[in-house]
Amino acid sequence: MSMSRHSAAGPMPEDRAAGPAGRVTRLAALRAAVARIEGEPVHRLEEPGAAASGRCVAQMQPLGVPEADRALAGGFPTRGLTELHVEETRGGGTGVGFALALAVLLADSRPALWIGETRAFREAGLPYLPGLAGFGLDPSRLVLVRARRLADAAWAGEEAARSRALSLIVLEVRGNPALLSLDGTRRLHVRACEAGVPLLLLRQHGQPQATAAPLRLRIWPGPAAPVPDLADQAKLLGYPVFDVAVEKARDGRLQRFRLEWNPHERRFQALDRREPHAGAVPHPALHRPGAARAAGALLALHRA
């Protein structure tokens, strides 16, 4: 009982007796614990301005749409970890399309790497080479890694994040596995920052959770704009449209915006303002059942 009272009131008697030396020892132990959690040596945590050094400060690639660039505080980060979430596995194509658009936008002489576990590819499908070309990405610039287990996919992602030979890394998984929670994502983020490469963690049916990713976006499919200068527009689809919600950001601003991807010019663009919209609105056919049919007359049929 007396020990509980001392613990609630302040330092234990022996801690008081230890004086400054005891406090220094406890502070050193606390710093060591924080260093283990952060995955950094203690001396790096104590360096003045270490957090502001260029080692892990993301550079931004403007998306070319003022609304989106304002929401992202300048553009998309070109180094470190970013999470992309889609609501359901059946909507995984939306997340894949957005990631591929980023791969095109960030492309250089280096290839992009797409890593996925077998279960994720089995549910959402594999990238289709002719479709990649039609989307604006050279299929020869994409390397695909299909891992049997999540642990293998996560290991491949960590090893790839060390490399400077890639223009973009995508790690596609299902849901929120414990292997890619706070500790696992911190390793991915630190290694991608040090290598100066953007790493996208694409979660099918992903739920918000504590991770080391400074930026988390949720992606929905948006209704395509009409195709101009064609008489019969009802049977045609316009360019892909992405409704994007910023769920986590360094500056704390949670915003929404809409982007249209132009595969011919290989760039994002604002949606045609002839089709105004208020915020990101998921397409109703993908998120609610079809309308019930009107009741009709019932006929009693008798066998002859």
Image (cartoon, helix red, strand yellow):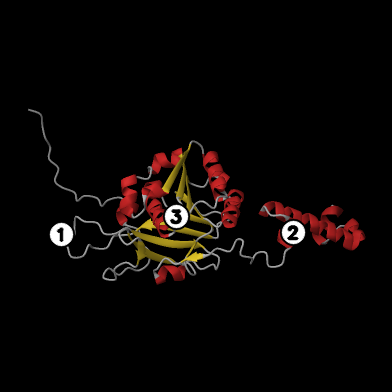
Which quadrant of the figure has residue 104?
bottom left
Q: Secondary structure at mark 1?
A: loop
| Residue 273, x across and y down, in percent | 29, 71
Q: Disc 1 versus disc 2: distance between alpha carbons?
A: 67 Å
**Amino acid type of disc 3?**
Ser
**Residue farthest to the top?**
304
Report if the CB atoms under discs 3 and 1 are less than 8 Å apart. Answer: no
| Residue 152, x across and y down, in percent | 54, 39
| Residue 34, x across and y down, in percent | 71, 55
Between circles 1 and 2, the one closer to the viewer is 2
**Amino acid type of disc 2?**
His
Residue under label 3: 109
Residue under label 2: 43
Q: Disc 3 versus disc 1: distance between alpha carbons?
A: 41 Å
Residue under label 1: 232
Between circles 2 and 3, the one closer to the viewer is 3
Q: Secondary structure at mark 3?
A: loop
